[in-house]
Amino acid sequence: MRDIIKHLNQTIHASALCTGVLLCLSFSTSSVASGQNQLDGVKQEISRQQNQLDNRQKKFNALQKELKQQELGISQTAKKIHQADNKLSTLKTSIAQLEREQKKLEQLQLGQQEMLKELLNAQYRQGENSQLSNLLSGEQSNELDRMTVYAERLSQARSQALNQLAATDTELQLKYHQLKQQREQQQIVLAQLKTEKNTLESKQTTRKKTLKSIKGQISSSNQYLNELQSNEKRLVTEIAKAKAAAEAAAKAAANKAPMDGLARHKRKLPWPVKGSVLHSYGTIQQGELRWKGMVIAQSSGSQVKSIYSGKVVFADWLRGYGLMIVIDHGKGDMSFYGYNQTLLKKVGDNVRTDDPIALVGDSGGQERSALYFEIRRKGAPTNPKLWLKK
């Protein structure tokens, strides 16, 4: 009996062990399957998020391209407005000069008319005296000769006065015609200016919408920091290109403008624009990124001037900096002017101190009009304020 009970117990124990092992195997297989499903789900989510990021980046880049084209369009329109303003100024000066000349001619004409009137009266009186002398038998021949000479001179003076008056009248009519043409041209330019300003306003409205969309694509401060760092890398790349171009140009030919560098002009250089400093060199721009130059507030369309003589080695739109112009001053010294509305100089142009080189704007996606200004020596940024007059 004991052997039977013992055998039964062994059988039951063995059965229980088998059942436990089977249950464990069952649970283990189920857990692995569940974990694999979760892993697949995570991978799918990662892939989905990556696709979203890729699409977001593509859209962001496309918007930046749109912004570039819009700001280049604004630049062209702003340049037309600038040229029209200059033409209007020239026309205004020309019209004022013509009006002064016209007034002088009118005064001259009045004087000539008065002189002619006096000559005619004198000739008339002399004629009466001559008729009277013929009636008087006692008149001496010498006196008659004198009267004859006087009459001839009066006739010559009258003829000369008539010729002068005719010439003045012709010149005056020419001035009237020139004035009319200038005023008509002025009205045409004014109409063009109005059209261009309306076009500019429309383009700026479109740009604002694009800028708003761009900001919508930047979802975090880290993303904004990455964009700023990318912009800085692009600038460094362009600096290297500009430096190489400047060195090549220096070897190819002697420059007409002085290229003696900025070393002797510390704290003596003029400001590129007058205005309050919004951001100073070395202050925090975003995260650990600091400003490599300074941002100076000024109204849109104000002239940006070169701080010193040199040669333009870059003049184009650059992401993050908008329309930028770079001037090589020689000996590794360069000045940078960004955020412009339009550029007045092109690559290869020689400039001198205080030459207008651009117009202040808000290109590069800026929220307000200002100038980004930077000085680099042998490629390294330096505090620009230390080089400018106080």
Image: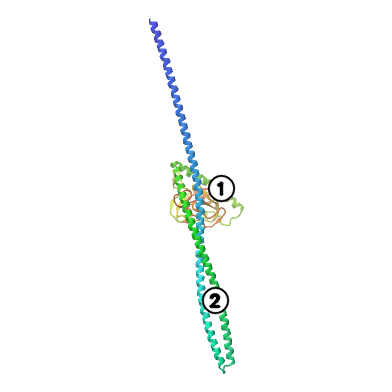
- Vertical position of residue 119 compared to residue 257: above or below: below
**Is residue 279 or residue 263 the one in the foreground?**
279
Percent x, y of residue 85: 49, 59
Say whether residue 202 is left or right of residue 170.
left
Q: Is residue 58 visible?
A: yes
Percent x, y of residue 112: 52, 77
Quarter holding the N terminus? top left
- Vertical position of residue 232 compared to residue 276: above or below: above
**Hey, which residue is sitting farthest bottom in the picture?**
138
**Is residue 263 or residue 199 the one in the foreground?**
199
Q: Are marks 1 and 2 in contact (CB under 8 Å)?
A: no
Quarter holding the C terminus? bottom left
Percent x, y of residue 290: 46, 46
Q: Secondary structure at mark 2?
A: helix
Which residue is located at x 59 percent, y 92 percent? 141
Which residue is located at x 42 percent, y 21 percent? 27
Q: What's the amino acid at mark 2? A: Leu
Q: Is residue 271 visible?
A: no
Percent x, y of residue 188: 51, 61
Say whether residue 4 is left or right of residue 134.
left
> Alpha-carbon distance for marks 1 and 2?
68 Å
Which residue is located at x 49 percent, y 58 percent? 193
Q: What's the amino acid at mark 1? A: Lys
Residue that label 1 marks: 241
Badge 2 crowding class, 10 Å Cα cut-off, few under 14, some 14 to 19, many 20 or more, is: many
Q: Secondary structure at mark 1?
A: helix
Which residue is located at x 58 percent, y 86 percent? 149
**Precedes in sequence: disc 1 or disc 2:** 2
Residue that label 2 marks: 165
Residue 257 position by quadrant: bottom right
- Vertical position of residue 36 compared to residue 153: above or below: above
**Is residue 204 or residue 293 the one in the foreground?**
204
